[in-house]
Amino acid sequence: MNNLFADLPTDLPEELVEVLAENKHARIERIVSTGHASPDGFWCDQEEAEWVVVLKGEARLRFEDDDKPIHMKMGDSINIPAHRKHRVEWTTPDEPTVWLAVFCRD
Amino acid sequence: MNNLFADLPTDLPEELVEVLAENKHARIERIVSTGHASPDGFWCDQEEAEWVVVLKGEARLRFEDDDKPIHMKMGDSINIPAHRKHRVEWTTPDEPTVWLAVFCRD
């Protein structure tokens, strides 16, 4: 057994990504951000579909095809189809933001 | 966007299962229990591997091959391989228990 809120770092040089479960089709990750954002001008373009939820903290996500950012708080989840370009504009610096992400090939 | 803690019923005749995302390989479900348990003597024997986390509430899970039940609280996650027989022995009657489960074929 593993607790998603255990061992939360409060200050990280980079996002912390841990694989919780994986097989040939899918991968489940815990991602911890402490104020991180995607680099300026960078868009994440993924081969895999991603379903992601914020379990603690807050974040602002943006899609290249939508001018309006999405503010995500505890419990908010979203589906990101493969190749829908997106970036993390902001995560709160006030506490660790814990994401749970499920990546899956079509 | 969808919030995992929204619209939580407090009294349910049966567990509430909602599919949050699905493709041919994997399925993500929110399951809400309000004091539910598996029927006496029933063991769940699944074709799919399941990764499951308790996001709110508390539960006790038991495997047929292990006499000791596993007490799960907020954030506790576990991998259940396909065909490892298990049952939910107890969920707290004090509040809704919210599970997030990812089912995946090998």
Image: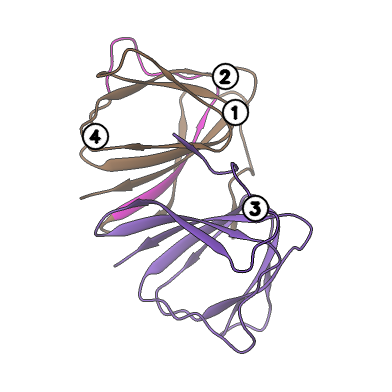
Chain colours: A purple, B brown
Residue B103: give x, y in percent of width and height.
Answer: 33, 45
Discs 2 and 3 share one subunit: no
Which residue is the extreme one toward the top?
B40
- Magenta stretch: residue A89 in it? no
> What element does badge 1 sit on?
loop
- Dividing the picture into quadrants, the one containing residue A46 is bottom left
Chain letter belonging to callout 2: B
Pointer 2 with pointer 1, Cβ within 8 A = yes
Discs 3 and 4 share one subunit: no
On the question of residue B22 being in view, the answer is: no
Alpha carbon of mark 1 to alpha carbon of mark 3: how far?
24 Å
Query: Which residue carries the number 4 mark?
Result: B46
Task: Name the side, left or right, on which A79 lies relative to B92.
Answer: left
Alpha carbon of mark 2 to alpha carbon of mark 1: how far?
6 Å
Residue B46's place in the image compared with B44, above or below, is: below
Task: Name the side, left or right, on which B9 lies relative to B48.
Answer: right
Q: Residue at x 23, y 29 (%)?
A: B45
Precedes in sequence: disc 2 or disc 4: 4
Residue B61: give x, y in percent of width and height.
Answer: 41, 22
Query: Which residue carries the number 1 mark?
Result: B57
Q: How many marks?
A: 4
- The amino acid on which the numbered mark 1 sits, given as a three-letter code, is Gly
> What element does badge 4 sit on?
loop
Residue A9 is marked as 3
Alpha carbon of mark 2 to alpha carbon of mark 4: how far?
24 Å
Rendered-image quadrant of the N terminus of chain B: bottom right
Which residue is the extreme one toward the bottom?
A41
